[in-house]
Amino acid sequence: MEKPAIEGGSPIREKKLYYGHQFLDEKDYEAVEKVLRSDYLTCGPKIGELEEKLCKLTGAKHAVVCSNGTAALHIAAMAAGLGQGDELITTPITFAASANCALYVGAKPVFADIDPETYNIDPESVKAHITDRTKVIVGVDYTGQACKWDELIAIAKEHGITTIEDAAHSIGTLYKGREVGTLADMTTFSFHPVKTVTGGEGGAVLTDSDELHKKLLLYRSHGITRDEELMEAPSDGPWYYEQVDLGYNYRMTDIQAGLLISQLDKLEMFKSRRKELVKRYDEAFKGIDGIIVQKEIKESDTCRHLYILRLDLKKLKVDRRRFFDAMGAEGICCNVHYIPVYYFPHYKRLGYKKGLCPNAEALYEEILSLPLYYGLSDDEQSDVIAAVKKLTEYYHG
């Protein structure tokens, strides 16, 4: 155990808490075992069953599941027709995949700034970055809170732009009473283990468009089809297929799908507990000098994936790194979500420089992600709260 942050004190926890963790139960184990004992480990019936379940859950007409959330963004960008010379607008406060999906197809990511209170992409900044080359807007529901989708969709419609909702954080969130999954032209999910539901890995793209659905199915699986309407030659027999476009092997296994079907049965349970934990954090930190709580828009009924603690460094005699290390010394292992995407060396080599998005850059210097997951107990959360209060008081100016 590291030395406690405050000399002469004892750490709040001996056993460390981490910012995220999956929750699996016997039903999950049984679901996976059932697939393992079946005839199909991949390309089997669980794929269609999961896609139907996602459609029923969200109200979307179509769902295409794939290997991970990054693959979902890639095939969504391809289905949108994004390509060489085009531009995609997104936020820098996200995992790199939200922007990388533009690079994968030869397009240019353009970064719009964030709202300094909600931390989501600012529609006014999006509007300011639109050019005649803008083809896609990727709004990221950061921490699980829905973007201002009415405004983003109105901007997109005015300019003939495709919208993609990166909902990697926001499965279970409602926007104006509508489930995430039906707001944008396409919605992408991630099922990584720290997300609300998990398949170990996995992703999905949801859409109401029949045309986009056909493209997504092709790009998920090598550009290969058995659909005679899409093939150029008549079928020679049941073995016949054609590669009609260039796609990828982004298929999900039935093992993952089986686990996800079981996990989705617990979504309301997961959602309820996460809301309880967020409410308790908000109440505990409200009014503490030196702490800023993320603002939530009234339109978003949020199932939160991350809980962001923002430090008011004008009032604390400490920088973010020292506070981060001090939390670790108290037994609370935080994280930081996210480093602005254009800070990375690859983006620097492409010509991106600091200063593009002042609100996003200021946020990055001041944030920590606190533990938030279904299995976090009240006592464990109390330890997190106690550590934050202890350090805030100690470092207060």
Image (spheres, rainbow, N blue to C red):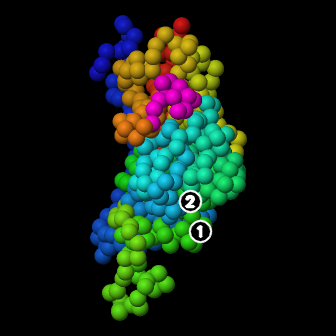
- The answer to whether 320 is drawn above or below residue 196 in the figure is above
Question: Is 360 colored magenta in this rendering?
Answer: yes
Q: What are the residue bounds of the magenta stretch?
A: 352-366
Q: Residue at x 61, y 46 (%)?
A: 130
Answer yes or no: is residue 209 visible.
yes
Q: Position of residue 256 (x, y in %)?
A: 37, 61
How many numbered discs, if any? 2
Residue closer to the observer: 63 or 257 = 63
Answer yes or no: is residue 276 visible.
no
Q: Position of residue 212 (x, y in %)?
A: 54, 68
Q: Position of residue 181 (x, y in %)?
A: 58, 58
Q: Secondary structure at mark 1?
A: loop
Q: Residue at x 41, y 91 (%)?
A: 234
Q: Give the labeled residue for mark 1.
A: 209
Q: Position of residue 180 (x, y in %)?
A: 60, 54
- Quarter of the picture containing the C terminus is top right
